[in-house]
Image (cartoon, rainbow, N blue to C red):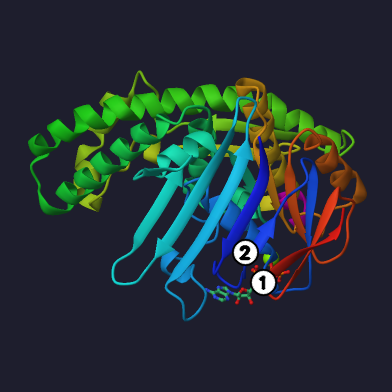
Amino acid sequence: MVINKFCTDNFKNLKEVEITPHKGFNLFLGDNAQGKTNLLENIFILTGCKSFRTHKERDFPRFGENLFETSLVFENSEREQSIEYVFSKEGKIQRNIKLNGVKTESRLQLFEQFKCIVFTPEDTELVTGQPNIRRLFIDYAVAQLKPSYNTTIVRFNNILKARNEILKKIDNPLLLEVYDTELVKYGIKIYEYRRKYIDILKPVVCELYSKITNDKEKLNIFYAPNVTAENYECKLKNNISNDLRVGFTTTGVNRDELGITINGKSAKDFASSGQRKSVALVLKLAVSKIFGEKCGETPVILLDDVMAELDKNRCDLIYETVKDCQCFITACKEVEADKVFCVKNGVAAVFKN
Ligand SMILES: Nc1ncnc2c1ncn2[C@@H]1O[C@H](COP(=O)(O)OP(=O)(O)OP(=O)(O)O)[C@@H](O)[C@H]1O
Ligand SMILES: [Mg+2]
């Protein structure tokens, strides 16, 4: 998948940007606070996902403005497609989204068509953060292969939320039965998808990590499910009195974990900062590799400030792994690239072809 053209205006500090990227490696080069990450963020929201930054949508239009407009022409192996996205916060929030010229209400349609993998320095949270960050990572990767998985996750989360609300209010376990049947039904689906995906992910991640460390370090990832398909219902029932006591659901796929070790030691507790960054990067690159293999189409890769802090071997592996993908990378110093855009004060101009 490649972006042929990208335009934006008034997204954060970006001003009348119009770029025609290279099919290979594109560099957004510039000093701090010029709009490099904003460019990646802008491209990423066109996948229909929430921003990878925690910023609220309301904060997207330039300070003092109510509206931003952005568009993209991209191409997969089958055809060229277009996305137009106009966001307004004048009064209530409104989005006017068009896919191939046709208005769509659902951002899921963008997600189904336009595929990006983004890596940012904050992704080290995948190693050090709470388990929900790793669950989200796996769920996002599964959903890229199977967009309908999103619906399963949304249904599960809605039932979980309703169950938790009931748990806070009542002390009669019988009232939970109707929720529990549905929770187990969707929970088992999630368990199966996560298990299968992690089985595929594991060898890819281990191989990539061996490569970047010249076989000196051994990375391992493993699924640590809180329940299995066989024991889900039973464990949920057995924990009801505990759930009623604490006021939320303490059992289920909502408590799953993705374990990560380096040389047998917990990465969360012992990894160095370079190791954390490498693990996070390898996880993201592995997802992109798997997507490419399963779908016969590589996602667009967005790498924010990735080269800083990594040694040459690690940087070389990045180039090697993404060589078949279109890639956008931000940096303050020049790195090897097919096309360089100089980003200054919200404007991106071609610097080198
Ligand atoms: N809604 C907004 N309107 C105008 N400017 C904004 C808005 N939101 C953020 N900015 C500004 O955009 C500028 C550029 O941000 P960005 O994160 O893209 O910088 P960057 O080029 O990636 O810098 P760095 O190299 O430090 O990562 C920042 O100064 C930020 O304050
Ligand atoms: Mg930045």
Q: Write the residue at 65% across / 26% down.
A: 77
Which residue in the rendered view is the most extreme toward the top?
A: 230
Does the rendering let one see residue 271?
A: no
Residue 317 magenta: no
312 horizontally vs 4: left or right: right
Please identify the quadrant where the N terminus is shown: top right
Residue 171 horizontal/vertical position (percent): 10, 47
Identity of the amino acid at label 1? Gly
Q: Are marks 1 and 2 in contact (CB under 8 Å)?
A: yes
Task: Please tell me in which quadrant of the rendered image residue 67 appears.
Answer: bottom left
250 horizontally vs 293: left or right: left
Q: Which sits earlier in the primary sequence, circle 1 or circle 2?
A: 2
The number of numbered discs placed on residues in the rendered structure image is: 2
Q: Tell me the SS state at disc 2.
A: helix
Does the rendering let one see residue 242?
A: yes
Q: Which residue is mark 1?
A: 346
Q: Write the residue at 62% across / 67% down.
A: 16
Q: Is mark 1 within 8 Å of ligand 1?
A: yes
| Front-most of residues 286 and 295 | 295
Q: Which residue is mark 2?
A: 38
Identity of the amino acid at label 2? Asn
Residue 178 horizontal/vertical position (percent): 13, 32
Disc number at residue 284? none
